[in-house]
Amino acid sequence: MPAAMDPLLARHVAVCNSARLPGNRLRFLLGGTEVGWVAPDAAATLAAHDAVEARADAVALREAERLPEIGRLLADRGFCPWRGEAFDVRADAAGPVLATIDRGAIPVLGLYATGVHLNGLVRRGEAYFLWVARRSATRPLDPGKLDHLVAGGVPSGLTPEETLVKEAAEEATMPADLAWQAVPAETITYAMERPEGLRRDRLLCYDLLLPEAFIPRAADGEAAGFELWPIGRALETVRLTDDFKFNVNLVLIGLFGRLGLI
């Protein structure tokens, strides 16, 4: 991010980097490797599990293969929803896979998670337009917020590119041959305090220039609809409002920079 960024844009960067670690959290160890951070109430629940060792500054799960049990325990005790989708667990954002856990438990344990975001662009002469989605009112996180054309977490067993193609089909009815044309643009990381817990995310951002003939349609109900906006409208919305989902702002700021708008 440029040092002299517009303060109205920079506030989004600050919001997404609100976590101060360790704070009051304890380290979460997996087979002796630090993988996350746990608040005291969740740590107390974990300490009662027969596979967990409680230490002065950490809780340690000795056997990585038992981590799915921890996810179920946290969901059963009301710390998180059960999402029914396994995500990989790593010691750092791009390290080797150590175990898997249900997606819902990731922020409770302060684990790294990887997501993909796609800037869906249309060009008319020298002018750029951006496809903007509105999240369904029934989404568990940030219902009704504005979003990217395609975005989603990378589940266990899929590469980021495979996830992008899958999400593009499910969220926007985009053909696979078109989604595969997306170009990697940048990687964004942040650590953020959220109602659901500690978000330590790595966002893999892609740009895709779409043909005029492509009109997205919501296939899985996660989006309430789509609109094609002039890029300037998107910039002013990010600058002046909090209408976009929190991390979408960061991805759009990067896009505005690549397009020479900021």
Image: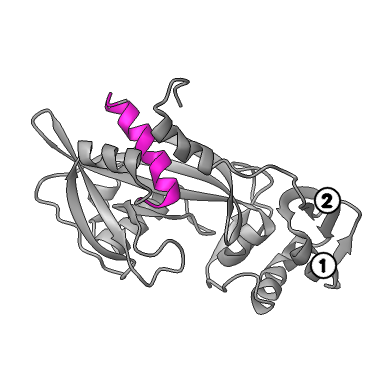
Element on which disc 1 rests: helix
* Residue 207, image quadrant: top left
Query: Which residue lies at the image location 68% right of the left edge and 42% below the top edge?
Result: 20
What amino acid type is highlighted by mark number 2?
Gly
Label 1 Cα crowd, 10 Å radius (few <14 / some 14-19 / many 20+): few
Query: Which residue lies at the image location 34% right of the left edge and 63% below the top edge?
Result: 144
Quickly name the residue at label 2. 32
* Residue 167, image quadrant: bottom left
Residue range in magenta is: 244-261
- In the rendering, at what x and y percent does residue 229 appear? 18, 45
Element on which disc 2 rests: loop
- In the rendering, at what x and y percent does residue 31 appear? 81, 54
The colouring scheme, among rainbow, by chain, secondary structure or one colour, is: one colour
Can residue 184 be seen?
A: no
Query: Which residue lies at the image location 89% right of the left edge and 61% below the top edge?
Result: 54
Can residue 117 be seen?
A: yes
Quickly name the residue at label 1. 44
Left or right of 182 on screen, residue 1: right
- In the rendering, at what x and y percent does residue 12 appear? 45, 40
What amino acid type is highlighted by mark number 1?
Ala
Is 250 in the magenta? yes
Left or right of 102 on screen, residue 232: left
Left or right of 37 on screen, residue 180: left
* Residue 61, image quadrant: bottom right
Question: Which one is in front, 110 or 166?
Answer: 110
Label 2 Cα crowd, 10 Å radius (few <14 / some 14-19 / many 20+): few
The CA span between labels 1 and 2 is: 19 Å
Q: Is residue 29 above or below residue 233?
A: below
